[in-house]
Structures are given as C-alpha cells and as structure tokens.
Image (tube, helix red, strand yellow):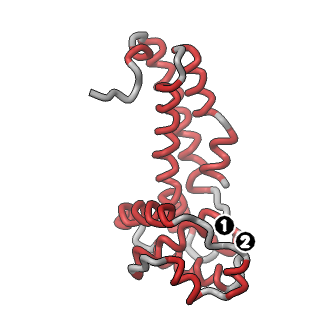
Amino acid sequence: MFKLIPQTILSDSRDTSILIKLAILGLMIRMVVMPFTLHPDLLFINFFPSLLIRDGVFDIYSYLEKHFSVQISQLGWFYYPPMTYYSTGFFQFIFKPFTPLMTVWLSDVGAQISGGGGLAHHYANLSGSEQLFRNLFFLKLPYLFFDFATALTLLWIVPKKENAIKAFKLWMLNPVAIYASFIF
C-alpha cells in the first residue's frame, strides 16, 4: 500500500515529529496569507473557468473572441491551455457550496477585465470584505493541495533521509514558494 511518507523517514519518531511541526508551521503561514492577499492574475485565471460553472461555456476561446474586445485579445490575455481552465473550474464547482456568491463576484471581475483591466483594489471593491476573504481563500485552496503534494514528493525523490527532511523544510518555509503561490 502506498504511504505518503517513506518508511525510512518514519522509522525515527524525532524525524516524524520534525516533519509534522514543519507541515503545521507551513500550513499556518499559508492559511494566514491566503485570504488577505490579492493579485489580479488570480482573478483573471479564475474568471474564465467560472463561465464553465455559471454558463456552461466549454469552448472558452470562442467565447473570449465573441465577448471581449479585439484590443484585449491582441494583448494575449487568453494564453492558458484548456486543462488549466477545466481543472480550475473543477475546483470552483467543488467549492461552490462554500462560496455561493463567487460566480457573481467573478462575473463582476469579468466585466472589469473586459472594460480594460484593473488593479487589485478595483477587484476587491466588487465584493464585501467577508465574501472577498472567503473567495480568496477558496480560490487559493487548490494551490495548497498541490503545494503539499510537492512537499511530500520531495520526501520521496531525495535519496538521503537527512537531505529529504531539509528539502521538505526548505519547501515548507520557502518565502518564494509561499509568495508565488499564495500571495502573488
């Protein structure tokens, strides 16, 4: 049976304790910044998948050509591959019971984008603060899943136990990884 952490690392209770503490600390740091940080790219990448949930738009590129200005199309704003839109839309569908107003908010974001873009504070003003914090948290939740999957993968691919624990620590406390995924 597949185990999340290699048995060689789990054989020492001290190493297991260190990994658990690092995982909890890394999780706490991420959960603190997730609902309070906003960059427009997060909303941009999530607006188009919300069309899949709200309007059943499966051919996102045809929709974009029909509903957005040529100027925006020429800026190259539609460069994500289809799997990005579908996987993001999948998570939005799963989280919909927890974020019932997210599609409305993302629709307002889309109107702002189609009008020429905007800055983070423009998008933040489109919702109440409680909705904003909840929506930001849930928009970043898939990143948390894949972030921890990466940390666990490091435990498996780094051959020496000591180096595997160092790699896990570096990932969990790495300000660049935290910034890129949960702040920017």
User: Eyeballing the image, is 4 above or below 177?
Assistant: above
Q: Quadrant of residue 171?
A: top right
Q: Is residue 1 left or right of residue 175?
A: left
For image coordinates 54% across by 22% down, the residue present is 158
For image coordinates 56% across by 74% down, the residue present is 127
In the rendered image, the quadrant that contains the C terminus is bottom right
For image coordinates 55% across by 35% down, the residue present is 26
SS for callout 2? loop
- Sort mark 1 into few (<14), some (14-19) or many (20+) by Cα contacts within 10 Å: some
Q: Could you tell me the amino acid type at mark 1?
A: Pro
The one nearer the camera, 134 or 5, is: 5
User: Eyeballing the image, is 145 above or below 72?
Assistant: above
In the picture, the disc for residue 149 is none
Circle 1 residue: 40
Q: Could you tell me the amino acid type at mark 2?
A: Leu
Circle 2 residue: 119
Cα separation, mark 1 vs mark 2, equals: 6 Å
- Sort mark 2 into few (<14), some (14-19) or many (20+) by Cα contacts within 10 Å: few
The one nearer the camera, 46 or 154, is: 154
